[in-house]
Image (tube, rainbow, N blue to C red):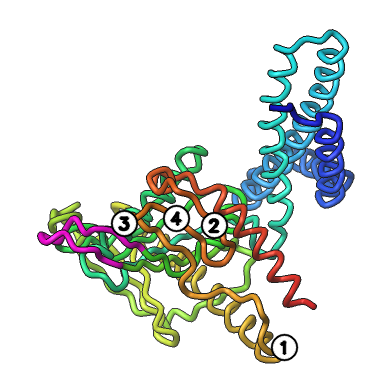
Amino acid sequence: MAGPDFDSEIKQLQATMHTIEQVLDLGSMKAEIDRLQEQVAAPDLWDDQANAQKVTGRLSLLQGELERFEQLSGRIDDLAIMVELSTEEGDAESLAEAETELGRVRKEVDALEVRTLLNGEYDAREAIVTIRSGAGGVDAADFAETLMRMYTRWAEQRKYPVEVFDISYAEEAGIKSAEFAIHAPYAYGTLSVEAGTHRLVRISPFDNQGRRQTSFAAVEVVPVLEQTDEIEIDENDVRVDVFRSGGPGGQSVNTTDSAVRLTHIPTGIVVSCQNEKSQLQNKASAMVVLKAKLLAKKKAEEAALKKDLKGDVAASWGDQMRNYVLNPYQIVKDLRTGYETGNPSAVFDGEIDAFLEAGIRWRRGADKAAAN
């Protein structure tokens, strides 16, 4: 089998990196890093802790992005030198190593290119994910729990902290719903393409006749808000209920009514939190989720209005967005992008990057079509 055309491949990588450099605007990025470093060096920075966290977080994010770009550019330059020397010396072993490195670099460049597509208003934010079981009875509840594990495994593999706000367990198996945050830059922009209805087809482990069962679960993704976001909530519009936290099988988590449920009366949005030991902490966490959902509702209404004014767009987000089929064959297929894999086990274990990348690219194409 013929090896890769190294010269052509490396030139293509360099061209892609040049495009990424323009999108990232490295000059402006470096200037902002300098300004932030000056603020971090100020002796009174931590007098305002909220602002200090925002400044240091932004600085860390930008420094990480710059370092990632520069290291990847350096690897491409090193690869070009390695290929040139190995070709001159006829070193087949080094060329084989270069081919392996080429594959790794190409994958990382593709991932970085996708990252540059996350330039929406809230794409850089952390994410709050809500999963609800749908039609399908106990299989749907089990599927909802599987999806929660899939996203938390994806986060854990990247060392992203996961904060569980609330889990409502089903009676026989699985969960009725779950709400959790993934604390990582661009978690919202990345995972927002997962929103929609997920469908599972399999032989039900809960059916004693071994029949095939179709079940559904809904995924919602909203951005975590910052203090500067303009979402005002009138306290008179929120009903606060407290209750005792519980776990699987009704086991008591604690002996006080510390769990909190907030109901936003004008919209009917309900959120709960029971992960903290104190009622005040749970109420504060629940309010974070409520504000995020109110913002998402506001944005959805604005988007719907724009769509009504613009007319139908050929490419649109449908409710049912992905099928997971375990019987009679095994495949996971995204219905919007067409991307598929024959390894559902790996997907359920958190290997969803290819689906995320395809979804982000698809969304950019849909946005462009809508704009035109």
* Disc 3: which residue: 327
Q: Residue furthest front?
A: 1
Q: Is residue 317 found left or right of 110 in the rendered image? A: left
State whether residue 126 appears in this view.
Answer: no
Which element type, helix, strand or loop, lies under badge 3?
loop
Tag 1 near tag 2, CB within 8 Å: no
Q: Give the camera-side residue of 356 and 222.
A: 356
The kind of residue tagged 3 is Asn
* Mark found first going from the N terminus, 3 or 4: 3
Q: Which residues are magenta?
A: 200-214
| Closer to viewer: mark 3 or mark 4 | 3
Q: Give the camera-side residue of 80 and 228.
A: 80
The Cα–Cα distance between marks 3 and 1, rounded to whole angstroms, is: 42 Å
**Residue 234 on image: x %, y %:** 48, 81
Residue at image coords 74%, 74%: 369
* Disc 2: which residue: 191
Residue at image coords 40%, 68%: 218
Residue at image coords 39%, 83%: 268
| Closer to viewer: mark 2 or mark 3 | 3
Quadrant where the N terminus is found in the figure: top right
Q: Is residue 304 above or below residue 342?
A: below
